[in-house]
Amino acid sequence: MFNNQSVRLLLTLPLMLCATAAQAVTIEEVEERMAEAKQFRVIEFSPGNYAEAQEALGDAKNYLSTGNHEKARSSLDESATYIEKAMKTSQQLTTQLSQLIESRDRMQMADPQHLRADLVERAERDFSRVVEAVEDDDMAKAKTQANLAQATIRAALVVAAREQYVRPISKGVAAARKVHARKHSPNALKASISVQREIEKLIKSDPDAQVKMYALSRRGEFSAERSMKIAALGERLSRNPAEIETMVDAEEARLRLLGNYLGIDLVRATNAEEQIRMLQQAIEEIEGNYRLQLRDSDKVIADLNTKLGVYEGDLASMNELRRKLQIKRDAEAKIKRLTSMFNPDVNVVEILLTPDSDVILRMKSLNFRSGSAVIPPNTYSMLDGAGEAMVMFNDRAVRVEGHTDAVGANDYNQKLSERRAEAVNSYLMEKLEGKRVITAVGFGEEKPIANNETAKGREKNRRIDIILLAPRL
């Protein structure tokens, strides 16, 4: 604990050091640099250098409390040197051994109940040997140790993936079989079993492919649940055939309600194909009437402008303005639905509408680990919501943008932003089963939205934006 005199000395140290030596580093500067270093996970990736930096900083404060300013300066310089070494080690690991870092991140972010504790413990022990080799500046040894660590982490990921992605489908299939799914819903049952086998193959070949496993697992669980529901219904109807009439009556009531809205009689259709044809025709008629109304309004505007003697260029500008307004209003209406879908109370996604009517989904809670492009599993549901938004805006092109803060080298931040954008792109492509074209681009630190000089500002700048691009006229 420092006394009042020591506190005053600490507060005035920057001035004292500057007065003694123009190039002297201050306690404030060292502590700020140490805080920045923590963003690069130096406690994990360079614990030896970080500990030396802390010890030297403590020594500097002790020397200062006794009035030994010369030794205080020397210790501060030593602390700053170790911080730089720690930063270098961290960036070496995340660039040269990025696959190992991200595999370890996946292991650490997996649900503990799906992991084997002994494998995790061994993996962390192997990883620490990699870190020691990098701190000793022996990259050849580090890469050899990295291969061993990767193998252990891979084993841990295989166990976790089977528990997390295969077992739920297995349980669903077993439950469906108990209600005679083979008899009542064979196709749905086969679909879930097929997905289960696909995941098992993927686990053996690439246990790091967690995003794809997650998407497949969701499909497999859905098929198994659907099979079970259909089979349970089949069993119930077998015991009580009179329920069939009640079900048909309920279905006809739903069709009648929809048909009344569209002005068609869906109940009298002889089969599902005819119902689909009638629905398509009704929708085409509605769209046709809408296009006619637009054409009529365009004609009225053209006639009015002709009478007023307005030039053709002004008429085109007016039409363009009207269509822009129409696109904007359509986006505003859909944004209202999106806002409720993302649960504004939780505030995980910020939805913005640009002057060009582009819709930006800012993934506020998508927090990647430093130096990593692994999507945290607890944000999967948020990205699922983004996928649903893309379906809602199905006429728009989609661009995923990765952004970083300004801490670290430009090239490092640029590549990291690209990897993160690609990771989100891959997730959304799996979610939508490749049915949409999505582009991914990284901007690094080029487009900040807040002040990079503050911690809160840097946090805002580290972001993923999903842009739903408005049609260009």
Image (cartoon, helix red, strand yellow):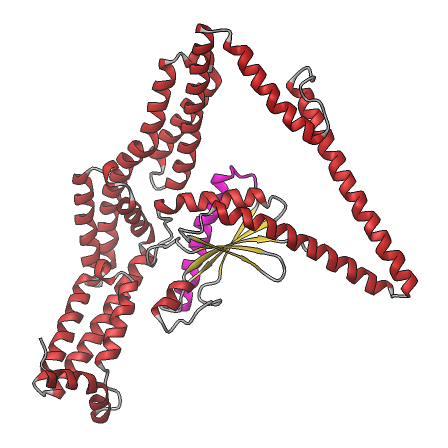
Q: Quadrant of residue 44?
A: bottom left
- Vertical side of 462 occupied by 288: above or below: above
x and y, in percent, of residue 57 in the image: 16, 75
Residue 356 pos. (x, y %): 63, 60
Q: Residue at x 24, y 79 (%)?
A: 28
Along the viewing direction, whichever of 128 and 319 lies nearer the viewer: 319
Give the residue displayed 36% in from the left and 54% down from the top: 368
* Figure disc tally: 0
**Magenta-highlighted residues:** 409-436
Instruction: Give the image location of residue 32, x and y in percent.
Output: 27, 74
Q: Is residue 332 left or right of residue 43?
A: right
Query: Residue 144, percent across and down?
Result: 23, 50
Compared with 85, 102 (above or below) is: above
Which quarter of the rendered picture does the N terminus lie within?
Answer: bottom left
The residue drawn where x is 44% and y is 66% is 445
Q: Quadrant of residue 135?
A: bottom left
Q: Is residue 183 visible?
A: no
Image quarter hosting the C terminus: bottom right
What secondary structure is the stretch in magenta mostly built from? Answer: helix
User: Does residue 244 lie above or below 469 as drawn?
Assistant: above
